[in-house]
Image (cartoon, rainbow, N blue to C red):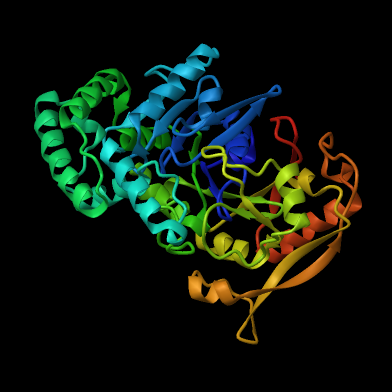
Amino acid sequence: MNYLLEGNAAVVGLQWGDEGKGKIVDYLAENAEVVARYCGGANAGHSVRINGVKYATHLLPVGIFRPNVVNCIGNGVVLDPAVLFHEIDEFLKLGVPISPANLKVSYKAHLVMPHHMQEDAARENKAGAGGIGTTKRGIGPTYADKMQRTTAIRVADLLHEDKLKSRVERIVVDRNKQLAAMYDSPPIDWKATYGLYRDYGRRIAPFVDDVGQILIDAARERKRILFEGAHAALLDVDHGTYPYVTSSSCSALGIFSGCGVPPAIVRNYIGIMKAYSTRVGGGPFPTEQDNDTGNYIRERGNEYGTTTRRPRRCGWFDAVAVKYSVALQGITAIAITLLDVLSGLDHLQICTGYRVNGQRVDLFRADMDVLEDAQPIYETLPGWRGNITTCRRFEELPREAQQYVKRLETLVGAPIKIVSVGPDRSATIMR
């Protein structure tokens, strides 16, 4: 058994998302018995490559590709039933077994509705260049309604059709008035919405369960649980680069409210970081390379969104930002991914500090105004050449690649235990 799963583990992002969490969750899930997703919605995308075939999930936990794993969608996830059933149908056609035996959906999870997507798109379009770069999938408005309470619909509501009908009518009619006044949006047919979600409810009913209790019982039975994060700490709604963040508590701090479990349930926190930095959409990015280097990284790393196919902004590794994420989330081990992408560069740069208003700053501050003015202070290391995707022992890597990994380990403050050198399951080195 992989020792990182002893006492249960969580896989979380250390940067602005897209670090390759899906691959690492899949890799560790070989020894897991339960995999639980705790945050985000269909705006997240995890990719897994198995025997050369690429699979992409948006709502289903990545443990779905491992036999004998129970996969849980926690209450912290906002669920778009259309996306969920599209994924289920797609994977069933590919021979991936999915049934109520290996997939559990929290009855407390909130639902993404058509008016949420309409509001998200209308607000982002109206903002133009001032938008924050949402995926327009209704995630933010759904979380906002969750806090409003009286305008939200949960999975549990789908199981009570008589009450669902009146609830949908009231909410949609009211939201139509708001959207028409604010964005001149066309009205949504509440009857069609009710019919659609009534049918979703009938299909989802066998999967609905008390996920929090399932996880608590699994922990008591000493089953190996793996918590799957989406997005990353620098996109956390409270602790990320606000307002250029996602709408959920997607750092490790969100696990317990997002699944309904106590903190003592997790011993190991595995942070995932790329060997370089990327982010999608707007927001400060001190180490961004909008030049040939950034283009090289983007093309070699296929840095295009799993969900949106938007090109990602690319740059050098920011050790200041990652050190912040490591401390915030109590990281006990790190997996570095996409190390192979950097092969072929003559030199590599690592941001070890910022210069702000003429002063050196060594601590990350999640303040947009500060970060917009931050100038990175770089340390330069030699690059390496050659294909490293066939390496399976750390000592097989070029000396310069080993040096790079060890230096990052020192700078961010946690041991790098996993080194990913390619997209496939097998292209993974355990240190």
Q: Is residue 198 left or right of residue 234?
A: left
Residue displayed at 20% across by 25% down? 192
- Residue sitting nearer the eye, 408 or 310: 310
Q: Position of residue 270 (x, y in %)?
A: 58, 48
Q: Is residue 379 above or below residue 112?
A: below
Q: Is residue 9 above or below residue 47?
A: below
Q: Is residue 400 left or right of residue 330?
A: right
Q: Quadrant of residue 115?
A: top left
Indicate the quadrant containing the N terminus: top left, top right, bottom left or bottom right: top right
Q: Position of residue 58 (x, y in %)?
A: 47, 34
Q: Is residue 8 visible?
A: yes
Q: Position of residue 241 (x, y in %)?
A: 49, 64
Residue displayed at 52% across by 29% down? 63
Residue displayed at 24% across by 40% down? 186
- Residue sitting nearer the eye, 295 or 17: 295
Numbered circles on residues, count: 0
Q: Is residue 66 left or right of residue 132?
A: right
